[in-house]
Amino acid sequence: MSADESEPLLSVSDLTVSYGKVTALDGVDIDVRTGETIGVMGPNGVGKSTLVDAISGFLDYEGSITYRGMEVSEASTQTLVENGLFYCTERRDLFGQMSVEQNLRLGSYLNRDGENERLEKVFELFPRLEERRSQEAESLSGGEQQMLSLGRGLMSDPDFLILDEPSIGLAPVVLEDISDALAAITDLDVTVLLCEQDITFALEHADRLYLLENGAVRRSGPTESLQSDEFVESYIGG
């Protein structure tokens, strides 16, 4: 997808995050422009979740994170959501004893206009959710819960969607459904920040990639230029 050439929608500059004496991120620089799908790639423990937690306003940090020109540390979570940012966490954070439809409708709590139309769009993307719309979320399979988490994000009518490990633990047939939905989401002009350890999934969807290693960006660039990069080849090879 073509990106807006204006100022970045998200700008991360010299970002450092520490847990006590342990430095999880060290001098990270990332930018995301409107219309892009950006992949942040790396195995477990390199700082991907810490990065998106900080971007979403959940962690203290040094350096700068600006979203739509706002410094994230000075903005409330509600303000970020009101300005189009939605974070689908690796934990999925569903309300287990509520129905699929109730979980989805919670995603639009700040914007009820067009809620029913968005619900129908989610059901088009994930027919299984429509089949289970009255079923409790905790009774869904892991893949169905991932669909529900992603669908709830779409119910907020986001401009910028952050996805943390959407492929983790999914069977190939379910991963294909998630992959198809992500392609459809980017076609809706939603900007996406995708954190993934599945390099094949990231390469399929991202316009540009940032490769994290030990809390720092070791490689970055357009996906096409990194597909043959030695670092990526070694990553694929384990």
Image (cartoon, rainbow, N blue to C red):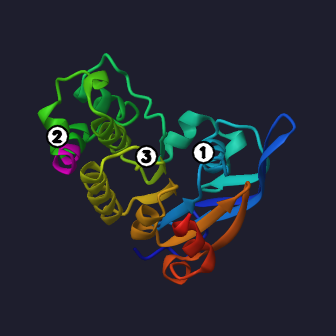
Q: Which residue is mark 1?
A: 49
Q: Is residue 146 left or right of residue 41?
A: left
Of badges 1 and 3, the one in the foreground is 3
Mark positioned earlier in the residue sequence (1 or 3): 1
Mark positioned earlier in the residue sequence (1 or 2): 1
Looking at the image, is 109 positioned above or below residue 13? above
Quadrant in which residue 153 is drawn: top left
Identify which amino acid the numbered label 3 is placed on. Ile
Rendered image: mark on residue 168: 3
| Crowd tier of the residue under label 3, counting other residues whose Cα lies within 10 Å: few below 14, some 14–19, many 20 or above | some
Residue 138, given in percent of the width and then of the height, sits at 31, 22
| Crowd tier of the residue under label 2, counting other residues whose Cα lies within 10 Å: few below 14, some 14–19, many 20 or above | few
Looking at the image, is 173 positioned above or below residue 149? below
Residue at (12, 34) in percent of width and height: 131
Q: Quadrant of the C terminus?
A: bottom right
Pick the front one: 153 or 198 = 198
Is residue 179 visible in the rendered image? The answer is yes
Q: Secondary structure at mark 2?
A: helix
Q: Residue furthest left?
A: 131
C-alpha gap between disc 1 and disc 2: 28 Å
Q: Which residue is mark 2?
A: 128
Is residue 33 visible in the rendered image? The answer is no
